[in-house]
Image (tube, helix red, strand yellow):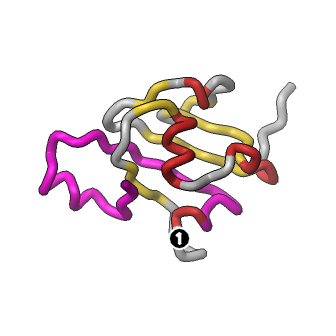
């Protein structure tokens, strides 16, 4: 399930909530207005790959993923826990590697 705010916590305080920040062309999956940050709350446990699937983001469109502000080259395989934050960037915003 995907929520735009944390109101669900007051109803189900025991659920796992992950905050996903969508950037660039991936914002369309969060149905966010063009002028506001695109932050969605995902109620799901599992790997980043599972979470991207639940949001509906195709893996081919993703370039870089940050978990709690740290870039992870192996992010798709990492398990996410309650309170984690994801930063998800599309291919056209990929990082430069030196």
* 91 vs 2: above or below: above
Residue matched to label 1: 31
Q: Residue at x 39, y 50 (%)?
A: 42
Residue sitting nearer the eye, 88 or 98: 88
Percent of width and height locating residue 51: 49, 42
- Residue 98 highlighted magenta (yes or no): no
Report the number of numbered marks.
Answer: 1
Using the image, determine if residue 83 lies above or below residue 38: above
Quadrant assignment, res 76? top right
Q: Quadrant of residue 44?
A: top left
Q: Residue 73 in the image: x percent, y percent?
A: 68, 25
Q: Is residue 25 toward the left or the right of residue 6 in the image?
A: right
Rendering quarter of residue 3: bottom left
Q: Residue shown at 52%/64% (left/top)?
A: 30
Q: Is residue 66 left or right of residue 25?
A: left
Start and end of the magenta stretch? Answer: 1-28
Q: Residue at x 86, y 25 (%)?
A: 98
Instruction: Identify the residue at image location x=55%, y=46%.
Output: 53
Image position of 15 (left or right of 86):
left
Does the magenta-highlighted stretch encompass residue 24?
yes
In the rendered image, the quadrant that contains the N terminus is: bottom left
Secondary structure beneath label 1: loop
């Amino acid at each position: 399930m995907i929520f735009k705010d944390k109101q669900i916590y007051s109803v189900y305080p025991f659920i796992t909530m992950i905050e996903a920040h969508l950037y660039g062309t991936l914002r369309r999956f969060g149905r966010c207005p063009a002028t506001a940050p695109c932050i969605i709350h995902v109620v799901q446990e599992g790997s980043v790959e599972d979470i991207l699937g639940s949001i509906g983001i195709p893996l081919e469109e993703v370039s870089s993923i940050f978990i709690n502000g740290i870039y992870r080259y192996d992010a798709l395989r990492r398990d996410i826990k309650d309170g984690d934050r994801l930063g998800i960037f599309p291919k056209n915003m990929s990082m430069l590697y030196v």
